Amino acid sequence: MFLAVKEMQHEKFRYGLIIAMIVLIGYLIYVLTSLAIGLARQNTLAIDSWEPKTVLMNRDANISLDQSILQKDDVGHLNKSQALIGQMAVIAKESNRQNESARFIGLSKSQFIYQELKTTSGHLPTKTNQIVVDDKFKDDGYRLKDRVVLNSDNTKFQIVGFLHDQRLNVAPVIYGSLSTWKALKGYRGNQIIGSAVMNKAGSPTYKHKAVKKYTKSQLVNKLPGYSAQNMTFGFMIGFLMAISLVVIAVFLYILTMQKLPNYAVLRAQGIPSSMLVKATVYQSLLIVVIGLVISGVITWGTGKLLPLGVPIYFDIPVLLAVSAGLIIISVLAALIPVRRIITIDPVTVIGG
Amino acid sequence: MEAITLNGVSKDFGSGTSYVKVLHDINFKAQTGEVDLVIGPSGSGKSTFLTIAGGLQSPSSGEVLINGSPFTSETRRQQEAIRLSKIGFVLQTYSLVPYLTVQDQFKLVDIFVKKNHIEKERFNQILKDLQIDNLMTKYPSQLSGGQNQRVAIARAIYPDPEIILADEPTAALDTARVKEVGKIMANFAHEKGKAIVIVTHDQRLSEFADHQYEILDGRMRPV
Ligand SMILES: Nc1ncnc2c1ncn2[C@@H]1O[C@H](COP(=O)(O)OP(=O)(O)O)[C@@H](O)[C@H]1O
Ligand SMILES: [Mg+2]
C-alpha cells in the first residue's frame, strides 16, 4: 500500500494519464450501457409496470399483442389477479399539437391494471371518452383537458391524466376503456373481448384450447425489434468491454514492465517478492477504482444534462456488475507480468 | 564469528563463444566486528563477488555460508528473509527507490523489517556525519551522485543488519567524505560487532580496513 501510493504520488503525470484513460473507457461503457438499457426499457415499461407473471394470448398470434384476439368463451371468468387488455397502435391527433404515434390499451375499471395505475397529474379515466397518457405527450405540448382524436375515428377523447414511464415498443401508451378499444378496432357484438390477459399470480385457468399461456419474458422478447435490438447492443457493449480490457491490460503491462528496475532495487533490499506483487495488484486496483468512480460521476452528470427525450437509464446493479468486471480483469491484467516481478534479477540494475 | 564464508566459489556466464569465467575458486571469510576491503580494477569481478556473497545471484559452483549455515541452498523465499533481516546492501548504482523521498526510504525499512532498528541517537549522528540530515524530503533524482551514495549507506545501516555489503560506496565522494564514510563503517563494525565487506577500486578506504584483499581477473588474494 505504502509503495503503491507513494509511487502514484511521485509519478502524478504518468498515473494521471492512465487514470484519465480508464475514466474515458469507463465513461464510454457506462453511457453506452445506460443508453442501451434506457432504450430497451422503453419497449417494456408499460408491461413492467403491470408486473405480470404470465400472459394468456391467442395460440395462433405468435405471441404478438397486435395479432392476439381473445373471445369471451376463451378465458371465462377472471379472478382478482387477472386483467384483460385490448391493445392496438394508434395515432393521436390534436389540431394544435404534433401527431403522436402511440399504443392504445383498453382496460376494465374493475381489474388490477387500472386500479394500480398512478397518475402524475390529473386523475384516472372514469368515462369511456376519457384517457390517461404517458408523460411523452406532456413533453410534446399536450395538456390536461386536451381533446384528441385517435386514428380517423370521429370521437374526441379528453386527456384527464398523465402517467410516468408508460411505454410499449418505445411508443407512449394511452390508457382508455375496453369498449373504446373495440370501437377503434371496429369489432361489433360481444364475442371479442380483448387482446390478452395479464396474470399477476401463478398459473391461471383458462377454458379454451385456442388460448395459450406465455411467460412475461416470452411476451417481451417477441415485441417487434426488441430482441434484435438488445442483441445488437449486447454485442456492441461486449466488444467494447473486450477491447477496453485488452487496452487496459496492455497499459498496465507496459506500466509494470517500465517499473522492473524499481522492483529490482526493492528485491535487492530484500523486500519479499510477494509484497511487490501485492503492491502491483493494489496499485492497479486503485487506478481502476479511482478511474471508474470519476467516470461514474461524469456519467451521472451527463444523464442530468441530456435532453429529456433521450432514453438513458442508470441500472445500478448492471453498472456495478460491469464495473466489477472491469476491476477484476484489470487486476488479472496487472498479474500477467507478475512472473517477471518474481523472477526479476536484482543484479540487472546493479551494473558493472 | 564468521558472518560470511565463500567456499570455492566460481561464476561463469554464457556458453560456447560467449563463455566467460568471472570468478575463479574464491575462498573468503568475513568476521563480525571487522571491515574487509576488496580492491580491484573495473571488470575484475568485484560486483559479481559481492552479489554472490549477498545472495543476489548464485554461484556456478561452490557455496556461500551466512553465520555458518548454508545460504546458497536455501529457497529464494528464505534467502529473501535473510537478506531483509541480516544484510544491508549498498549497490554500486541505483540503490534507492526512485519514487520515495529520503525519509520514506527509511520508512520502507520500518514497514518491512520487523525488528529493532539502530538506536535513534546513533542514527541521527550518522545522518549528520554523512551530511544528509537536511535532505530528508528530497527524491533520489534531486540528489547528487555523492548524496545518493551517502543516503544508500545510511539506509543500509538503518535496519541494524549483521552484515553490510557495499559496492563502490565512495566512487562519487571527495576525500573528506570518503574518510567520513570509512570512519562510520569502521565504527559500526568495531563498536557494534558487524561484518562489513566493501569492494572498491578506491585506495583511500585502505586505512579503515582490518583486512585487505586484491581481486584481479576473478582471482582473489589477501594483501
Ligand atoms: N550477467 C553477465 N553476463 C556476462 N558477463 C558478465 C555478467 N556480469 C558480469 N559479467 C562480466 O564479468 C566481469 C566482472 O564484472 P563485475 O563483477 O561487474 O566487475 P567489477 O564490479 O569489478 O567492475 C566483467 O567482464 C563483466 O563483463
Ligand atoms: Mg562493479
Image (spheres, rainbow, N blue to C red):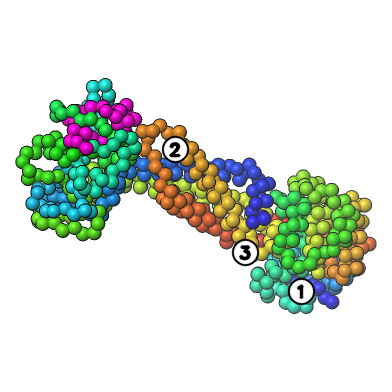
Residue B193 placement, left or right of A115: right
Specify whether A170 is left or right of A128.
Answer: right
**Residue occupied by mark 1:** B66
Name which residue lies at 62% across and 57% down: A279
Callout 1 amino acid = Ile
Number of residue marks:
3
Are dots 2 and 3 on a single chain?
Answer: yes
Q: Position of residue B145 (x, y in %)?
A: 80, 49
> Taking B128 as reference, is A232 above or below it?
above
* Subunit of label 3: A
Q: SS for tag 1?
A: strand
Tell me the amino acid under the disc marked 3.
Ser
Nearest-to-viewer mark from 1 and 3: 3
Three-letter amino acid code of the residue under disc 2: Gly
The one nearer the camera, A203 or B70, is A203
Q: Is mark 3 within 8 Å of ligand 1?
A: no
Give the farthest residue toward the top. A96
Query: Considering only vertical position in the picture, is A33 above or below A100?
Result: below
Q: Which residues are magenta?
A: A126-151
Residue at the (14%, 35%) spot, across then down: A184
The residue under label 2 is: A303
- Same chain for mark 2 and mark 1? The answer is no
